[in-house]
Image (cartoon, rainbow, N blue to C red):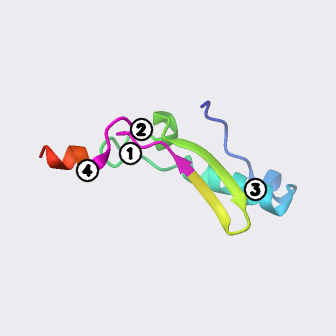
Amino acid sequence: MASTASPSSSALSSLPPRTADVAHAWALLEQLTDPEIPVVTLSELGILRDVRSGAAGLEVVITPLTAAVPPWVKLKTM
């Protein structure tokens, strides 16, 4: 997923409310860094996949770093 520039506050105010919420969420999420590699953002790692607006609010879709290995398998081997 290509990283895009965060929208400005004036650009957000001109969007419909739900679209502005999603854009604002993206702007905040773009700043999150990996806890183990704090110089790399989750967006740069490709972990952030989507932000969706629904009746219950916003949903953030991520791809875990261990997508190929279920966590319980990893824990059993430790």
Q: Nearer the viewer, mark 3 or mark 4?
A: 4
Secondary-structure class at tag 4: helix
> Disc 2 marks which residue?
40
Q: Quadrant of residue 37?
A: top left
**On-image quarter of the N terminus:** top right
Contact, mark 1 vs mark 2 (Cβ under 8 Å)? yes
Q: Amino acid at mark 4?
A: Trp
- Which span of residues is magenta-colored? 61-71
Q: Residue at x 56, y 46 (%)?
A: 30
Q: Nearer the viewer, mark 2 or mark 3?
A: 2
Q: Amino acid at mark 3?
A: Ser
Secondary-structure class at tag 3: helix
Cα–Cα gap, marks 3 and 4: 43 Å
Q: Residue at x 79, y 55 (%)?
A: 19
Cα–Cα gap, marks 2 and 4: 27 Å
Left/right placement of residue 30 relative to residue 40 reads right
Left/right placement of residue 23 relative to residue 31 reads right
> Disc 3 marks which residue?
9
Tell me residue 76's x, y (percent).
16, 48
Mark 2 neighbour density, 10 Å: few (under 14) some (14–19) many (20 or more) = some
Cα–Cα gap, marks 2 and 3: 25 Å
